[in-house]
Image (spheres, helix red, strand yellow):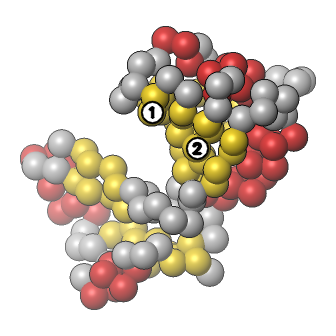
């Protein structure tokens, strides 16, 4: 079972830890109701370090992203994100994901933890655009903030 870099912090704060997508993840610190009220009335922070982060770089990065996802990534500008999906030729879904435009020739794809290996393999198999596919999933830590 994998652990995020903050696993020991979660344990120290007495988080309830469960198995999720091959990771030991915190799901609760106090009660569901107390945490719900905290998020509704103030803010919530979620450790999403288990998610996959894959960077796509190269002169044809946009063309590659357009080829493997279903939304129009050309509408993105640096700092923007869109929800999308990758589909097989028959229309079945490989995975849903977030597409971030970092710069003109660089995108970050955030993919589901349970599908990292499968998704990257699929991306590599469909890379006819000579882009660099860089999996930094184990090197990055991410948080979602709900305010």
Name the residue: 87% across, 40% down: 125
Name the residue: 18% across, 42% down: 147
The answer to whether residue 24 is left or right of residue 134 is left
Is residue 123 shown to the viewer in this render?
A: yes
Q: x, y percentage for residue 100?
A: 48, 33
Name the residue: 10% across, 49% down: 42
Q: x, y percentage for residue 68?
A: 73, 27
Q: Secondary structure at mark 1?
A: strand
Q: x, y percentage for residue 57?
A: 61, 36
Rendering quarter of residue 133: top right
Rendering quarter of residue 81: top left
Tell me the distance, in whole angstroms, between the alpha carbons under discs 1 and 2. 9 Å
The mark nearer the N terminus, 1 or 2, is 2
In this view, the residue in front, 44 or 66, is 66
Q: Which image quarter is the N terminus in?
A: bottom right
Q: Secondary structure at mark 2?
A: strand
**Residue on which disc 1 sits:** 102
In this view, the residue in front, 29 or 103, is 103
Asked whether disc 1 touches disc 2, contact meaning CB atoms under 8 Å apart, the reply is yes
The answer to whether residue 11 is left or right of residue 97 is left
Is residue 36 shown to the viewer in this render?
A: no
In this view, the residue in front, 8 or 41, is 8
Q: Residues within 10 Å of mark 1 (few under 14, many from 20)?
A: some
Q: Residue 55, which numbered label?
A: 2
Q: x, y percentage for residue 112?
A: 60, 50
Name the residue: 74% across, 21% down: 67
């Amino acid at each position: 079972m994998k652990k995020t870099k903050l696993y020991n912090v979660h344990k120290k704060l007495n988080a309830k830890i469960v198995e999720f997508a091959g990771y030991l993840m915190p799901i609760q610190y106090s009660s569901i109701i107390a945490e719900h009220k905290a998020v509704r009335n103030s803010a919530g922070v979620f450790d999403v370090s288990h998610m996959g982060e894959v960077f796509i770089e190269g002169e044809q990065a946009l063309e590659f992203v357009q080829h493997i996802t279903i939304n129009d990534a050309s509408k993105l500008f640096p700092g923007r994100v869109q929800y999308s999906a990758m589909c097989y030729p028959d229309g079945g879904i490989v995975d849903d994901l977030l597409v971030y435009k970092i710069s003109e020739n660089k995108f970050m794809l955030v993919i589901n933890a349970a599908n990292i290996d499968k998704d990257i393999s699929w991306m590599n198999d469909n890379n006819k655009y000579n882009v660099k596919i860089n999996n930094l999933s184990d090197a990055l830590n991410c948080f979602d903030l709900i305010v």
